[in-house]
Image: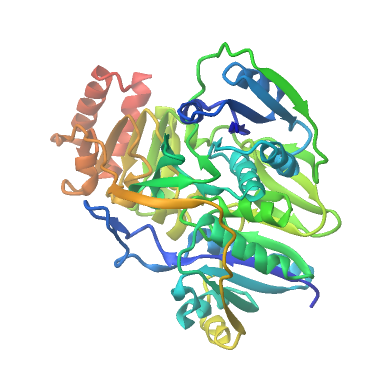
Amino acid sequence: MSGTVLVAYQWAPSAQGTLVTESGQVDASRASVGLSDSDHVAIEFARGLADQAGARLVALGVGPEAVSAGLATKAVASRGPDEVVVVRDATPTTISVAQALAAQASGMDDLVALVLGDASNDHGTRMVPGVVAGLLGRPLLADVRSVTLGEPATVVTKFAGGTQTLQAYGTLVVQVAPDAVKPRVPGMRDILAAAKKPVQVVDVSASIDNVAVTPISVSPVQPPSRGGRVIAADTPAAAVAQLVNELSQAGVL
Amino acid sequence: MTTWLIVADDAKVSGLLDLARALPSPLAAVVAGTRELADQVAGWVPAVTWFDTSAVPASGIASAVAGVVAADPGTVVAGMGVDSRLLAGAVAAATGAEVLADVIAAIPSGDGLRVTHLLLGGLATEEVGVIGPVVLVADGRTVPEPGSAAGTVTPAAADASVARVSTEPPAAAGGDLASAARVVGVGRGLKDAGDLSLVQELAAALGAELACSRPIAEGMGWLPTSSYLGISGQRIAPSLYLAVGISGQGQHMIGVRDARTIVAVNSDATAPIVAQADWTIVGDLYQVVPELTRALLVRS
């Protein structure tokens, strides 16, 4: 093998299933914990890139203690990476996660590419890829559909509703488009093999942070009140006629 | 110190201007785009640094944009589009700034700012105090009325590290959910992928884009993942959202709650969507949707 491809991932409670109480408490007890959809895509994309380069694929997770649990690392390893590295960060923020990813990436002399999902390793802010690229001093190739490695690499990204083809030199920082590839569903063989793959756990270094962010309050967002008009006519045709009439009168149609 | 506006994707910056103008420092902008866009922004902002991206992608000039802001750092306000986020990330890295996304409001407070932003994909709002450099990423919303600032536009060049070789137009017309005035969303009430034609015909008759709930894209794979609406998908604000066979779970409704009007077709009168819609037809979508399509076609 020649070179390393890194793929970043998040092991965290899904926003789906998370509740916010009236008093502002965030309750994630009923949320499923795992990889985000965009990370599934990123790992699959990175596997293909590593195969193209003849490189090893290292999955790099940053997050609280749960990221280093056996369940988590096996779930990640079963999706194609050759190795897993986890960086434990008790209170991850966009900046601390980006710094941890950049620190790991910059320590690899043979890095071919760092691959990230659309919403990897943050809380849906979608800002980690841009910050990581900035910290590494590399351009972020965003919304990427495909990469053909070489010097230069040929990169196809989404652009203005269509696509653009770019040429980029050196180590690539790639933010994968959410529909770039279809992620695999790990089979029993993948799951069994995952248990034998190397896992390295490190604690996050003190982040370079010259900003003080102090939480003040959290409030649930209330949906706007709606009309709640229910149309239950004798026939579908009658219900539709009534609806179209009312929408027209309301200026909706 | 300067309050910086980063404009990259388009001129939808009314939300960004509202944020920036609430801050005390003088306002300047970095525009990555066409000269026309830069001139437009100069109507609202007194000083514009312009990077021409007609031949190079935004990624190729990100470090140069970061250099402009880092030379006179201050609070940065940027949009949520792909290129805006890419440039804002580079600026945050260069200036050591914290990043807050989905920002709704920011006001001066003591030595810093008091910032309100959405959390967890829009489930909650959080208010935080920030002391130090910060990048605020927000919804640009709409194109403001032409301004009269008569600002200066200073062209800037970058040693682009990425080159654009070619561009390809969209394979098919339309498909922009974010700006669509009307959207039809389909959910698990649809029984088979082959039945998608029912809602596609409805969307065509309504002049609407087609979207879906998460399971239709992520679970079934019937529509692209870019089509699903909700907490981890797209959030839209059309004038009309027509939900077909969608139960109305909170995770989906967060993506459409800013629609001006919500109409639902659902067989279950107790489904959550009923209370969250302006109008609901309770009935079998396989009977109601063809009737609705016919009625809309006759009307047009």
- The structure residue drawn at horizontal position 32% and vertical position 59%, both measured from the top left corner, is A18
Question: Which picture quadrant has residue A165?
Answer: top right
Judged from this view, the residue extending furthest toward the front is B111
Question: Which picture quadrant has residue B164?
Answer: top right
Residue B250, x across and y down, in percent:
29, 50
- The structure residue drawn at horizontal position 64% and vertical position 16%, both measured from the top left corner, is B151
Q: Which quarter shows the C terminus of chain B?
A: top left
- The structure residue drawn at horizontal position 37% and vertical position 52%, both measured from the top left corner, is A215
Res B168 seen here: yes
* B218 versus A104 height, above or below: above
Judged from this view, the residue extending furthest toward the right is A151
Report the side of B279 relative to B130 (left or right). Answer: left
Residue A211, x across and y down, in percent:
52, 51
Residue B222, x across and y down, in percent:
47, 53
Report the side of A28 relative to B106 (left or right). Answer: left
Res B220 seen here: no
Residue A64, x across and y down, in percent:
46, 70
Judge by depth and name the residue closer to the eye, A168 or A253. A168
* B45 versus B6 height, above or below: above
